[in-house]
Image (tube, grey):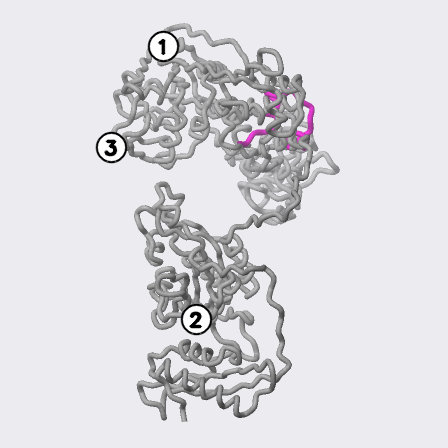
Amino acid sequence: MKFTLSWLKDHLDTEAPLAEIAETLTRIGLEVENLEDPGAKLKDFTIAYVVSAEQHPNADRLRVCMVDTGSGDPVQVVCGAPNAHTGMKSVFSPPGTYIPGKKITLGVGTIRGVESRGMLCSAAELEISEDHDGIIDLPADAPVGQRYADYAGLSDPVIEINLTPNRPDCTSIHGIARDLAAAGLGKLKSERFETVKGTFPCPQKVELRFAPGEEKYCPAFALRLVRGVKNAASPEWMQRRLAAIGLRPINALVDITNYITFDRGRPLHVFDARKVKGTLVVRRSRSGETVLALDGRIYGFTGHETVIADDNGMESIAGVMGGEHSGCDETTTDVLIESALWDPIDIARTGRNLGIITDARYRFERGVDPNYTVEGADLATKMVIEFCGGEASELTLAGQIPDSDLIINFPFAETKRLTGLDVSERESKRILESLGFMVSGNAPVVKVVPPSWRPDVHGKADLTEEIMRIAGVDRVLAVPLDRGGTVPKPVLTPIQKRTRAAKRTLASRGLIESVTWSFISKAQAELFGGGQPELALANPIAADLSDMRPSLLSGLVAAAQRNADRGYGDVALFEVGQVFRGDRPEDQLVAAAGVRRGLAKPEGTGRHWQGSGPVDLFDAKADALAVLSASGLSIAAVQVVQGAPGWFHPGRSGTLQMGPQNVFGWFGELHPKVLEALDAKGPIVAFELILDKVPAPKARPTRAKPQLALSAFQPVERDFAFVVDREVKAGDIVKAAQGADRQLVTNVAVFDVYEGKGIDPDKKSVALAVTLQPREKTLTEAEIEAVSARIVADVTKKTGGSLRG
């Protein structure tokens, strides 16, 4: 919600500075997101007098002007504007000025052999309008030397606030002023004015045509005809305010409705009366009907929207956007002013279904003041007659304005009970009344009637909130929580602990955290096992963000490729987030994933004189095992099985599991076809773990770590080479060697795999380095030989291998 300071002061009598207004807005719950001074970019532009304007000696369309800037001698300016002449006053910019309309910084130049020390500017060059036909022509009484922004009123600060959905009253500047006045920052100006009396009956018929039970979609519809109008440009002050908040002025009739939408929070619509044929009918749409809207697009209806139609067909999408056919333009002479009341839920659903976001929808779906329906039409009529002339008819009201009979019994002590804020009964009553609530009865319990513009207030807690935010949350005393006499229980869940451990571990391994979209395209979702109909979004924000992601890898691969496209090819990224396998709660899982590209190995990124190679599947495997270890899982218990889902390379990938029924992760090189579909260049290695499926570590009687036991004896290392079938996994050989003597064997590492000359074609040689660590005494040669024999025997028995000669 945007508004200017001067616009706010139309409704609030205050002398408070801008900083105090901004601070107060945030304090009472209307958070200020941005403060903008549009005059800052025009600070160097001043009013100047053209002493003379002579023909350029070397160009027919240029003039050499001597310009009095109000500071020193006149300066010479070469100007190409057709309206530049002696004796006029215009806007001058000296050298060094940034020209916003041209996106350049002005310097001293020579144009066709004549020096130019500045510039006379058009409105388009200052970005205050689209007029670029000539330089700005100011009145004769414009003060030479004064800043043009101050003279033209362009230094009006723009305030932008962030509204929560429960504050429809503050979608109007008048409502914001009401809150500030209640907070003691000034006095609210009266919004009442005399009702416009029509001089003839309204000839346009209106009918609310709904089935029984559907009357809620449009409880009331007010309409008035103003004939004999002249639809020209709106006043300059109105155009300036609308432009300041990002609206493009169109014409007086349209600008008036836009102005009242922001000024009073009352969206209106105007029809060109001559383009309306027959009775205006407010009804539900029919499936297959379409309308050409004011944005130039054709919208189709499903039968679940409220529309306005006449004998020509569709004229408007009720409460959202008008139709092009009956729109007002410069030829409009008779105008119908509509002020209607629409159902908030219906408007929100219609806007979502059609994908339309408008200022009218923004307000109607939050709930507008029903009691301002007629007054909004009167205000619009008054402004139309003032700016465009014409004669108004009597007001036609179809339906009736709904009455609210809500009365809340409110004990003043409720504020203290719910918030801890001690506000006196007198101050509480003043706050509520200043916000428009009617308070009757005697303390300690009073009866409170909410105003019509506050549909969000339903009970005592809502009234307490109003008192607290206006009185000031800063008045709530800080009271420490009672810690009790016992040790507090852990507050983090196991998955929260596991998530944090995964992030710390991956960051320590040189990966950079990335946060990617939870939505991906359907094609990408299908690449990673998703794309089910139940995971498609009903109203995606973009065509390529249509499905919930089944995997984190699509977003990480895209992020890695974007880095590569910008020259950072050696990139390692990780993400810990949610993936979706279905539409049930248990199908929403927490995953940890990482990708490595180029030379982004764990020991360092990039090229090095000692040598460096590209990442491989073992880097991804190490990342995954590090996360599992940090989660408390014993790495020795993790089974590594060859193969992975279809998005991994079939021969360069693996699955992490603890039994075939508990698969919780994958790692490896991504499939080239998947990378091609993602428009990414590989190779890229990746891993993904489903943290919800990782088994919890066994409970221990104490959280203390076991005592560190260091052996004083020298470890012994022995190498073994076993010839086994090619299908035998190296991991099975390692486990067999470890099981030979779990007390002495402290480490087993594969250091060589050989296939070729000297080995049968269907065999391979796997070499192990086995570390023996004695703890009670130094091992004798006989003891070492005995352990070695057990290792050979266990490997032979469990894998069918033999010791290589």
Q: Secondary structure at mark 3?
A: loop
Q: Is residue 453 left or right of residue 154?
A: left
Q: Is residue 702 visible?
A: yes
Report the span colored magenta.
Answer: 1-22
Q: Height in image: 618 above or below 219?
A: below
On the image, the x and y values in percent for residue 533 come to 30, 47
Query: Residue drawn at (36%, 47%), measured in percent from left and top?
Result: 546
Q: Secondary structure at mark 1?
A: loop
Identify residue type, mark 3: Gly
- Does the segment drawn in magenta span residue 371? no
Q: Is residue 223 left or right of residue 300?
A: right
Q: Which residue is mark 1?
A: 202
Query: Residue drawn at (36%, 25%), measured in percent from left and top?
Result: 318
Query: Residue drawn at (38%, 16%), measured in percent from left and top?
Result: 220
The Cα atoms of the two marked residues, 3 and 1, are separated by 33 Å
Residue 147 location, quadrant: top right
Q: Which residue is mark 3?
A: 288
Are circles 2 and 3 on residues that touch, CB within 8 Å? Answer: no
Q: Residues within 10 Å of mark 1 (few under 14, many from 20)?
A: some
Q: Residues within 10 Å of mark 3 (few under 14, many from 20)?
A: few
On the image, the x and y values in percent for residue 155 come to 63, 32
Image quarter where the C terminus lies is bottom left
Identify residue type, mark 1: Cys
The nearer-to-camera label among 3 and 1 is: 3
- Does the segment drawn in magenta span residue 13? yes
On the image, the x and y values in percent for residue 653 come to 38, 69
The nearer-to-camera label among 2 and 3 is: 2
Q: Height in image: 90 above or below 743?
A: above
Q: Which residue is mark 2?
A: 617
Residue 377 location, quadrant: top left
